[in-house]
Image (cartoon, grey):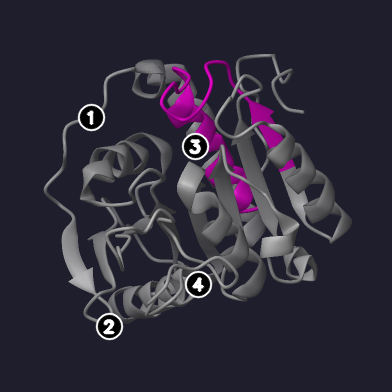
């Protein structure tokens, strides 16, 4: 059953590249959709936006895929346009998406997504707990496949996403762009065993050097993880490549255990 689903998804994506190339090559952010809904978990400060599946046929016995997208920057509502673009152009129509909203505990707080070892004073909960609570709340709304729960992190959220991916059993993998990777601030990397990590980083990034992702690839692989590192030109996250949605589309397929499709037709040179 899972092999059939992977092949079906791969065929769908290949057909999409033939008939809808502009959808992934566009440079303008898509307009904000109105189909998302704001929710909270059992904690009133754990707010998130829920994007229901856009189209659902017969649901497989395993359930639907779920992806949590933690924006970079300030991690707040301003990044709903980014999430909407990913939902529209990068994910299968049966995917459930949740966007947690970072909470600022103090005015002086600089860390957007607190972790176990890096936290602001007065923090009420760490991002790990927030992610787990969102997953539990979404599971009450939709039948979620426990083997297809993934995370996406960008810059400031990457550290928290990495921690959650290696500590939460329900999370099977993560897409992480332009993020720091400091093992001394992470739990035991043995939690990466059997999980998938798609890293996306620019060699010219002056804010977060690509050496962080190179280190992440090496250490996560040494601890049993499956890791892909792809690059793009243009620096940090504010200068995304034109094919960014196609890259994340490919990443979503690969995270599910499907094939890693070529970045461009007949060219896989961008994969390190």
- Dot 2 falls on a residue whose secondary structure is loop
Name, please, the residue furthest toward the left: 34
Dot 4 and dot 2 residues touching (CB under 8 Å): no
Q: CA distance from mark 3 to mark 1?
A: 16 Å
Q: CA distance from mark 4 to mark 2?
A: 14 Å
Q: Is residue 232 magenta?
A: yes
Quadrant of res 272? top right
Q: Which residue is mark 1?
A: 30
Q: Is residue 155 visible?
A: yes
Image mark for residue 249 = 3
Q: CA distance from mark 2 to mark 3?
A: 32 Å
- Dot 1 falls on a residue whose secondary structure is loop
Residue 1 placement, left or right of 192 = left
Region rendered in magenta: 228-257
Mark 3 is surrounded, within 10 Å at the Cα level, by few (under 14), some (14 to 19) or many (20 or more) other residues, namely many
Q: CA distance from mark 1 to mark 2?
A: 31 Å
Q: CA distance from mark 3 to mark 4?
A: 25 Å
Q: Which residue is mark 2?
A: 43
Earlier-in-chain disc, 2 versus 3: 2
Mark 4 is surrounded, within 10 Å at the Cα level, by few (under 14), some (14 to 19) or many (20 or more) other residues, namely many
Image mark for residue 128 = 4
Earlier-in-chain disc, 4 versus 2: 2
Q: Name the residue at 44% across, 17% down.
A: 242
């Amino acid at each position: 059953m899972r092999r059939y689903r992977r092949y079906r998804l791969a065929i769908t994506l290949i057909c999409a590249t033939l008939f809808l190339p502009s959808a992934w090559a566009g440079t303008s952010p898509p307009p904000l959709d109105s189909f998302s809904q704001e929710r909270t978990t059992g904690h009133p400060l754990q707010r998130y936006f829920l994007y229901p599946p856009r189209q659902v046929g017969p649901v497989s016995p395993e359930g639907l895929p779920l992806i949590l997208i933690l924006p970079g920057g300030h991690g707040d509502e301003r990044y709903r346009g980014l999430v909407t673009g990913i939902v529209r152009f990068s994910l299968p129509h049966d995917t459930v998406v949740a966007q947690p909203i970072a909470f600022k505990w103090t005015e002086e707080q600089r860390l957007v997504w607190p972790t176990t070892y890096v936290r602001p004073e007065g923090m009420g909960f760490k991002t790990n707990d927030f992610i787990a609570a969102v997953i539990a709340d979404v599971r009450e709304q939709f039948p979620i496949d426990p083997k297809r729960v993934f995370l996406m992190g960008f810059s400031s959220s990457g550290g928290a996403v990495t921690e959650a991916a290696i500590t939460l059993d329900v999370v099977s993998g993560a897409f992480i762009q332009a993020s720091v990777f400091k093992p001394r601030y992470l739990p035991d990397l043995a939690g990466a065993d059997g999980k998938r990590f798609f890293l996306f980083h620019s060699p010219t990034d002056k804010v977060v050097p690509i050496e962080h992702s190179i280190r992440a690839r090496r250490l996560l692989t040494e601890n049993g993880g499956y890791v892909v590192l792809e690059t793009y030109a243009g620096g940090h996250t504010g200068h995304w490549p034109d094919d960014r949605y196609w890259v994340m589309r490919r990443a979503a397929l690969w995270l599910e255990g499907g094939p890693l499709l070529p970045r461009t037709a007949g060219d896989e040179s961008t994969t390190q």
